[in-house]
Image (spheres, rainbow, N blue to C red):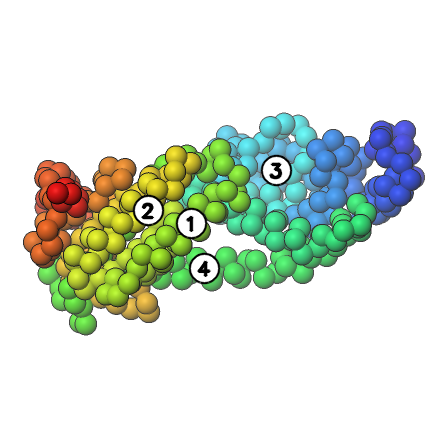
Amino acid sequence: MVDFAAEGLLDGLEGRDRAARERLLQALVDDGASLEELRGAVADGTLFMLPSERAVGGRNRYSLEELVEESGLDRDFLLELRRSAGLPIEDSTARDLTDVDLEAARTAKLYDDAGIPREAQIEVARIFGRAMAQAADALRRLAISMVFEPGADEHQLAMRYADFAVSLEPTVGPTMQQLLRMHLRHAVRTELLEALEEHGGALVGQRDVAVCFADLVGFTRVGEVAEPDELGAIADRLETLATSLVALPVRLIKTIGDAVMLVSTDVDELIDVALRLVDAAEAEGPNFPKLRAGIAYGPALQRAGDWYGRPVNLASRLTALARPSSVLCDQAARDAARGDWQWSSAGERRVRNVSRPVRLHRVRRPPAD
């Protein structure tokens, strides 16, 4: 038996709240939670999440040194991997690592033994860590919205949260795997088509289209200071703006976080939408990131609602070169345009996976009379 009051785990609680805390603490003790875990969770204000953390993450606890010994992974490399994934270890002596941490370390050891370069492992950890942190936050908010009930005490909320996490957890892995496989399919298809075009191959079914990518400047930096809900609202607003401006022959193909992809058989119509989208982002005010866009023209292939080919890859890369609140086009897009646009040269630039320098042009509306 643990004297929860003597341990300071009931401080500031009275009546119903105190009784609920005692039930929750006793349930955790019965589940094998240590006094150290309870103290840490109470101090952090996360006690109600501890049952779900133990159910999903595992009930065993390890220090960093124990994790290194159990996994066989180099200590410094393990720390670097975790930092890259956004999971730093602040106290190497604390036994607050769990079975899932050990499983991840053992997986990294398999990669290491297989000869996968550590630089590549760190890069993947950084990319996956950022994506998984966002996914975990979305799932956390979903769980809270599903289990919260006015009047529920701490014990009831904790148990409902744990039950929901346990029921949801088996579906998360397959969902992540399916999404990853679909994105890998897209990436492989893009690389193969790009290689075929680079060597003069013809893509059956391709046709000439103008492709535009438009993304929010500094969206990543905004994410470092903004709340997740605010960040999601900005991305949602971009999609809403694009949807409201698009009309045939321009089509909104997809949104990719802080960017949208548009395709049109008419270059002038696409330029018009891109410029209006830049203006619409500007009109949102100083708290909304500026927009930039890149447009390329040429033969592309449509498959499963998406587009593949040189103009797709080139437009994406031109977007990264464009200045805030500007639209950058390749030479083919300018040559195909017939509208009364104002053009200015942006010089020639080397672009990844394009053998020759690309001549670039900024496009604007003509000055008003």
Q: Earlier in the sequence, mark 1 or mark 2?
A: 1
Image quarter in which the C terminus is found: top left
Residue tagged by mark 2? 280
Q: Where is residue 305 in the image (x, y as percent from the top left)?
A: 32, 67
Residue tagged by mark 4? 179
Q: Nearer the viewer, mark 1 or mark 4?
A: 1
Do residues under tags 1 and 4 come within 8 Å of each other at their CB atoms?
no
Q: What residue is drawn where x is 50% and y is 57%?
A: 176
Q: Is mark 1 on a helix, strand or loop?
A: helix
Q: Is mark 3 on a helix, strand or loop?
A: helix
Do residues under tags 3 and 4 come within 8 Å of each other at their CB atoms?
no
Q: Disc 2 residue type?
A: Ala
Q: Disc 3 residue type?
A: Leu
Q: Which of marks 3 and 4 is nearer the N terminus?
A: 3
Label 1 Cα crowd, 10 Å radius (few <14 / some 14-19 / many 20+): some
Q: Nearer the viewer, mark 3 or mark 1?
A: 1
Q: Which of marks 3 and 4 is in front?
A: 4
